Amino acid sequence: MNILILLPSLGGGGAEKNAVLIANQLAKKNNVHIVIIYNEITNENRKRLDNNVSLTLLNKKKIIFSMWKIRNIILKENYDVILTTVAYFGITFSFLLPFINRKKKIYIYRETNIPSIYNKNFNILKRIIFKLGYLYTMKNYDYIICQSNDMINDLNIYSSIPSRKIIKINNPITRPECHPSIINNKKSENYVFAAGRLTQQKGFLDLIKNYSTSNALKKNIKLYIAGMGPQYNEMKILINSLNLNANIILLGFKDDLSSYLLNAKAFILSSNYEGFPNIVLEALSYGCPVLSNDCPGGINEIIIPNFNGLIYSKNNFNEMLDLILKIDFDRNQISEDIIKRYDANLLLSKYDEIIDNDSNINFNHNK
């Protein structure tokens, strides 16, 4: 089959890394072509991409300006499957679907967030467009792939997408290259770690404030934060105002987080919401216990309290941080468990199943 994957970019985020994994899986027995709207792809994602996957960069500045070009690409080439992801792109493309020949084609959208919460980040006009999209045009897709039960529940309330079109496929994780004995015997260094795009969604400002009153600070346990984004300067100002420049280290963008995850005492997810956080899966695959905010987006599916981490609320961050630093976690068991539950080979093969058995999908999306 000929498969087209449409993406805004292949930057350093979790959604982009998963898109590469999906493309590589589908390329094992199909012709896969990725079209990127912006001229953005990290060196690591370029290296990860299978040689059998062809790549086109449209170099457009805005999604809307790419729609006519995408329409022409679809009409010109004989694609059997078109897969899109990321809400603002998926919604825009859904408006175009009625004007494209749908005969013998499968259109798939892969949701990456909690729509009703994600929509609140935009101005009134964009909120209206988003809402209209989820009410009227997102159902133009043949299948909507969700990663978490929270995401499915939100779509059932927020959209008019028929439940028969919604399929749950968790984000996958691959086994780290390091040997399990290295994970289990590694002595953690004196820091906790967080990573992600520096946006309001990720809750880093709250994390900095919480850390500033924690016992971890008093014990000289540092906080490392990897990532870049619009809140970088605001975070720098806050850190400086708290006189914590020596304790909170902003590392900037790091595409390879393995050494930080392998050596950290714990990983902290401070997000206000997620889709199904790849970074948590990655941290656990390195045996790094996770302290997560109790946010929607699959956290309760991933975290097993006292086994691979803890979940905190707004009122007990310091208590939970103290506790996670005291628990003697079996890092090898943490790694083996998460790889078994979210095995990449098993989960990615479900994309093949959708395509191969389009008329007889039998996934239980409530599991």
Image: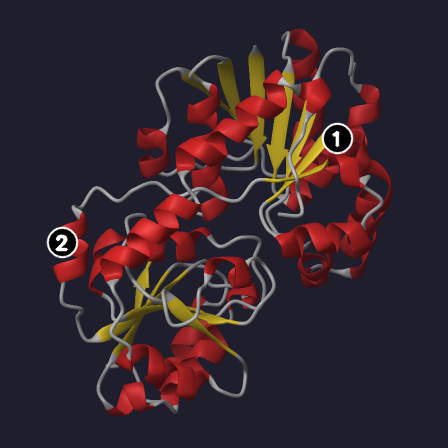
Task: Give percent across and percent down for residue 262.
Answer: 22, 58
Q: Which residue is mark 1?
A: 141
- Identity of the residue drawn at 29% across and 86% down: 216
Q: Is residue 157 left or right of residue 21?
A: right
User: Residue 20's quadrant in the figure?
Assistant: top left
Question: Is the residue 238 above or below the residue 131 in the image?
Answer: below
Rendered view: 14 above or below 350: below
**What is the x, y in percent for residue 16?**
47, 40
**Image position of 147 with respect to 34: above or below:** below
Residue 180 in sight: yes
Q: Residue 51, which numbered label?
A: none
Provide the residue designation for mark 2. 182
**Seen in the image, is 216 located left or right of residue 95?**
left
Specify the amino acid type for callout 1. Answer: Tyr
Nearest the eye: 196 or 313: 313
C-alpha gap between disc 1 and disc 2: 45 Å
Label 1 neighbour load within 10 Å: few <14, some 14-19, many 20+: many
Callout 1: SS: loop
Q: Position of residue 155 (x, y in %)?
A: 75, 50
Q: Are marks 1 and 2 in contact (CB under 8 Å)?
A: no
Question: As rendered, which of 355 and 264 lies closer to the eye?
Answer: 355
Q: Which quadrant holds the N terminus?
A: top right
Residue at 45 percent across and 83 percent down: it is 317
